[in-house]
Amino acid sequence: MPDRAPTAPLLAALAVVLTWGLNFPLSKALFNQVGAAGFLGLRYLLMPLCAVALLCWRFGRRWPRLDRAEIGPLVRLTLVGQGLHLLLSAYGMQGSTAFSASVLLACGPVFTLLILRLSGLERLSRSQV
């Protein structure tokens, strides 16, 4: 009898595809109910709870320690990177279609690479160009 492919990875991949596929239409529907600011508020209330649950699941009560020098950059990255990004993308998505927002999100790595290049932090290789 031939070995059958394991179904757990296939089901996990299907769950990821469904989650990403439903993300923008569900976000747009939620924006119509609570607005972009309400959506961001809900997200900022739920994400720390999810992060704590993940840390507890992975590490129990012995979470990894941060060096004191890492705390400042982490806070700045969180406020500017995530805070500003989520705020701008939420208001952008509220004023556009789910399709347009998903196309912009798909272009994110290109914009990130260009920003890093313009700031002198990254050199573009031939394959990246």
Image (cartoon, rainbow, N blue to C red):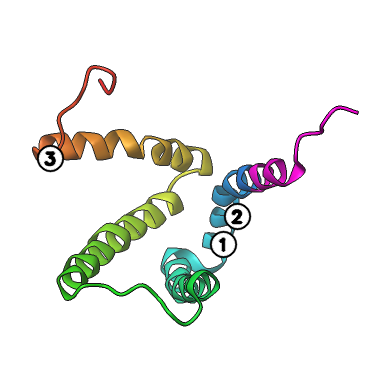
Answer few, some or many: residues within 10 Å of disc 2's Cα (few below 14, many 20 plus, some between 14 and 19). few
Q: Are marks 1 and 2 in contact (CB under 8 Å)?
A: yes
Relative to 88, residue 72 above or below: below
Of circles 1 and 3, which is in front?
Answer: 3
State the residue at coordinates (67%, 43%).
Answer: 9
State the residue at coordinates (46%, 76%).
Answer: 45
Tag 3's secondary structure?
loop
Q: Residue furthest bottom?
A: 61
As for residue 64 lying within the magenta part, the answer is no
Residue type at mark 3?
Leu
Residue 47 place in picture, x, y as percent: 46, 70
Residue 117 place in picture, x, y as percent: 15, 34
Residue type at mark 1?
Leu
Residue designated by label 2 = 26
Looking at the image, tell me whether mark 2 or mark 3 is earlier in sequence order.
2
Residue 18 place in picture, x, y as percent: 65, 45
Residue designated by label 3 = 121
Residue designated by label 1 = 30
Q: Which residues are magenta?
A: 1-15
Q: Are marks 1 and 3 in contact (CB under 8 Å)?
A: no
- For the residues marked 1 and 2, what is the alpha-carbon distance in whole angstroms? 6 Å
Towards the viewer: 80 or 87: 80
Q: Residue furthest right?
A: 1
Relative to 74, residue 8 above or below: above
Q: Residue furthest top?
A: 126
**Image position of 69 (left or right of 47):** left
State the residue at coordinates (44%, 35%).
Answer: 103
Towards the viewer: 57 or 31: 57
Looking at the image, tell me whether mark 1 or mark 3 is earlier in sequence order.
1
Relative to 57, residue 89 above or below: above
Residue type at mark 2?
Leu
